[in-house]
Image (tube, helix red, strand yellow):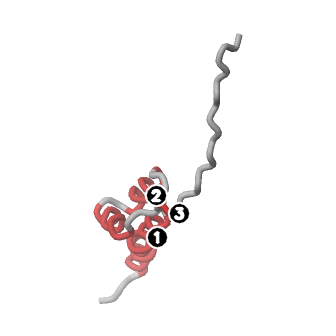
Amino acid sequence: MGFGAQELLVFFVLVMPYFFATFGLVPAVARAKGRSGIEWFFIALFVTPLLALIALAAMPDRQREDERPETPEVPEFKWRKGAG
């Protein structure tokens, strides 16, 4: 009793990409966006990796305070009194 061609095809076409996305791709994308890779691994495990990736794509990047670019100071606009 061994694996036939159909079982191997199902394994490599369906099962392997699912595991690759759940264990590798979703946590990597989550960490790149500043989110917890472990939390998103469990979300991908219980929902699906595709829905988890769509949700991650819809979320804005989360940056740490020290990584945020400094905002340039905007000069205060002063109204002229008595103009007109």
Q: Residue furthest top?
A: 84
Image height of 40 relative to 8, above or below: above
Q: In terms of sequence position, does the residue under pointer 2 or pointer 3 come before the other? A: 2
Residue in front for this viewpoint, 14 or 29: 29
User: SS of the residue at dot 3?
Assistant: helix
Residue in front for this viewpoint, 4 or 71: 71
Image height of 55 relative to 38, above or below: above
The residue pinned by badge 3 equals 67
Q: What residue type is labelled 1?
A: Ala
**Which mark is nearer the camera, 1 or 3?**
3
From the viewer's perspective, tell me whether residue 69 is left or right of residue 8: right
Numbered label tally: 3
Q: Which amino acid does label 3 sit on?
A: Glu
User: SS of the residue at dot 1?
Assistant: helix
Image height of 7 relative to 32, above or below: below
The residue pinned by badge 2 equals 62
Q: In terms of sequence position, does the residue under pointer 1 or pointer 3 come before the other? A: 1
Q: In terms of sequence position, does the residue under pointer 2 or pointer 1 come before the other? A: 1
The residue pinned by badge 1 equals 28
Residue in front for this viewpoint, 35 or 27: 35
Cα distance between the residues tagged 2 and 3: 10 Å
Give how far across and how far down residue 48 sits, in percent.
Answer: 35, 61
Q: Residue at x 45, y 63 (%)?
A: 34
Q: Residue at x 64, y 28 (%)?
A: 78
